[in-house]
Image: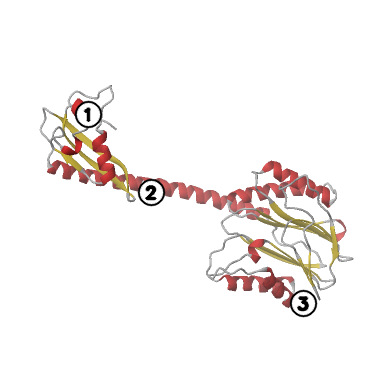
Amino acid sequence: VIHTFGDGLRKDPIPISGSIVNAVFESKASLLTRDAQLDKRFKASESLLEDDVRSAICSPLWSEKRVVGLIYLDRGIDQEPFTKEDLCLLSSLANMAALKIENAKLFEEALEKRALEEQLTLASEIQKGLLPHGYPETPDFDIAAIQTPCFQVGGDYYDFFPLEGGRLGVAIGDVSGKGLGPSLLMATLRAFFCSQLRIGRSLPELFQDLSTFIHESSNPGTFITFFYGELDPDTGSLRFANAGHNAPLIVGKELRTLSATGLPLGIFPERGYEEGQTGLEIEDALLLFTDGVTERRNESDDEFGESRLKDLAHGARGSCAQEMLHTLEASIKEFGGQAVLQDDMTIVVIKRDL
């Protein structure tokens, strides 16, 4: 903002001494020159001579330990020079102005933060609505699950699908990254997966289309680890496909893992997927989890680890699904202590009762 006194506002550009401005920015202190024509600090300044500047004062505007602007005044050779009292007054005004600017900035930031928090809260509620509300009523399977997002929204996903003949479908996934972006991509995957699942195609074909869809719908480098399996209550058989997800565990007399049958979704869509086959005996449990569980760190920066998870799960064999889940959840919480949660965590337990 530039204003002149006497003849009103000038239409032509108003020159300001770059020498004085630079000196104030560099020193971060107010400056007074009573006679710029004789001041040794500015003797090389042609602009002061050309513009007939006799006296000038300039004060910086301080905000968060940095200069965000300044107030500059000058007088011509036919006017009285500025005094130390003038400089003191200008410095006081500059301090007041800087404080007002900072308060206004903080107020705007507070409004923006509040609007963002409201949007995140809404997104969190929408995402919670996409997760299962309770568990399918399946007399042959005992089910328990929990999800703990790192932020208000996350990139983890799990779901259950009651199928024909009493079969039960279960899915779990994890988008690379954390926060709002992964949560949106996961919601997109869920919608596409649910629509394609109803068509009734083979798992390799389904996962191939999922991978192509994610590759075309996301930025390069984004991928999703994803597992889907279908349990038959009559035989205990489990057919599944695993796109690079943490190997699920079958907790029985012996501990078994379900290895990947293809790469994570979205990396190389041209690469195919295979279907895996296994089975659950009565009293066996299928344990699904995301890497936020095994990579949970404590205050000493140690990882919870897959070995610890396996030992705890095998030790809880014979418990109902909810008790096994509670054992794992309590152990992870105790291990993490006060360390900040760094990733979303999801655990699903499905036990074959009959």
Q: Residue at 76% of width from left, 49% of height from top?
A: 194
Q: Residue at 24% of width from left, 44% of height from top?
A: 94
Secondary structure under badge 2?
A: helix
Mark toward the viewer: 1 or 2 = 1
* Mark-to-mark CA distance, 3 and 2: 57 Å
Q: Residue furthest right?
A: 235
Q: Mark 3 belongs to which amino acid?
A: Gly
Q: Nearer the viewer, residue 325 or 297?
A: 297
The reply to whether the C-beta atoms of the residues labelled 3 and 2 are less than 8 Å apart is no
Q: Residue at 53% of width from left, 67% of height from top?
A: 339
Q: Residue at 58% of width from left, 67% of height from top?
A: 297
* Residue 267, horizontal then vertical, whole percent: 71, 48
Q: Mark 1 belongs to which amino acid?
A: Glu
Q: Nearer the viewer, residue 231 or 42?
A: 42
Quadrant in which residue 33 is drawn: top left
Quadrant in which residue 293 is drawn: bottom right
Secondary structure under badge 3?
A: loop
Find disc 2 in the rendering and name its residue. Answer: 106
Secondary structure under badge 1?
A: helix
* Residue 127, horizontal then vertical, whole percent: 63, 53
Task: State the mark number for residue 46.
Answer: 1
* Mark-to-mark CA distance, 1 and 2: 40 Å
Residue 11, above or below 306: above
The reply to whether the C-beta atoms of the residues labelled 3 and 1 are less than 8 Å apart is no
Residue 346, above or below 188: below
User: Horizontal placement of 286 versus 56: left or right?
Assistant: right
* Residue 305, horizontal then vertical, whole percent: 65, 69
Q: Nearer the viewer, residue 188 or 342?
A: 342
* Residue 331, horizontal then vertical, whole percent: 63, 73
Find disc 3 in the rendering and name its residue. Answer: 318
For the N terminus, the image quarter is top left
Q: Mark 2 belongs to which amino acid?
A: Leu
